Image: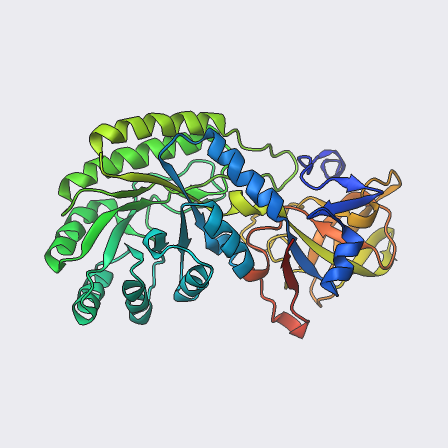
Amino acid sequence: MPPERLTAVHAPMPQFPVQDGELMVGNERLTLLAARVGHTPFYAYDRALVRTRVAALRSVLPPGIQLHYAMKANPLPALVGLMARLVDGIDVASAGELKVALDAGANPAEVSFAGPGKRDAELRQAVASRVLVNIESFREVAALEAISNELGLPARVAVRVNPDFELKGSGMKMGGGPKQFGVDVEQVPALLARIGHAGLAFEGFHLFAGSQNLRAESICEAQQKSYALAVRLAQDAPQPVRFLNLGGGFGIPYFPGEQRLDLAPIGDNLARLAQQAQVELPQAALVIELGRYLVGEAGVYVARIVDRKTSRGQVYLVTDGGLHQHLAASGNFGQVVRKNYPVTIGNRADSLHTEIASVVGPLCTPLDLLADRMALPVAQIGDLAVVFQSGAYGASASPQGFLGHPACVEVLV
């Protein structure tokens, strides 16, 4: 067995304490929570952890920096309703998400709508809802002009810019080079002129260079470049900039060897940018947009072990969940080389009796793998396997219809 499989260590997961051998989620023992939910598999999101994360972030952000939740990370309506009360705005990526956000009580004035392929019907809904539309093509300007004239409402718009740089070290690059997102920076002046001619209500810019970054210096550099670019583009804007979304990119530790993001340098950097903006963009609200960072560590995925088998010396713990419900943990959601999420046996979390085992699902594919030869508490049929860091890009990012297995439950506790 390769030695690195045994020596690599995940970051500690202290957000879920252990009591009498069981993980505590939402101040409830895991086995009792499973009984309350009614069946496995399920996702559970701890609302107290979400509140704590938002408060901790607020404590390092300078006054005046607004915090938006990117609900693509987790669109569970109950969770969106909680976030709508904790943050300054919600960012949506479809008309379906827009409905969830508005139903959850989000203020339309603080909702923005991004996405490279907005249908005309979605744009019409956005204008009628009076939310901010992040324009990503010249076609959208023409469509919004027609819709604004039809409804008698000037569309509120910002320009999503595809910058000429990327967020270094990010897990997913959203800017720099050819991209389907936004408008290339060199084309933005012409787009701004078109927006002015169309009579749309221009409000600002949206820049998002990348996501899932654990290097504070890279995030600070991207914020500085995004701010400087917005100041330059503002010279061609038809109205003063009132909204500047500097994106997010804040990562959380998933894999062995990763460390948690240091927020202090980011807070200091944003304080400097906010001070500059008072002079250079005096009417602009500076926004950071986060999804995974706000909710990712507050969630667990729980599946019950339905079989235990040994194949040529390797232990397999077969569960009733798998990649159809947690695609990311299986390694099939953008990983180049598969790495294990942090996993444990939730009702034996403090057991010193461990073994090397793989946690797999019930699907007829070798890709259905939740833990590959990890050191885990020795588990038996009926025990509960838990995947940490599961509050973002879990159920909604997984092919739950694959092979006809039942859908999982999601609960906010």
Quadrant assignment, res 255: top right
Q: As rendered, which of 293 and 221 lies closer to the eye?
A: 293
Point 22% across, 35% down: residue: 281
Does 201 sit left or right of 77 as displayed? left
Does 117 sit left or right of 3 as displayed? left
The quadrant in which the N terminus is found is top right
Quadrant assignment, res 272: top left
Image position, residue 348 (x, y; %): 84, 46
Q: Is residue 363 visible?
A: yes
Does 101 sit left or right of 317 as displayed? left
Point 42% across, 56% down: residue: 106
Image position, residue 201 (x, y; %): 19, 54
Relative vertical location of residue 32 with respect to residue 149 in this rendering, above or below:
above
Q: Is residue 337 visible?
A: no
Q: As rendered, which of 356 and 219 lies closer to the eye?
A: 219
Image position, residue 50 (x, y; %): 57, 45
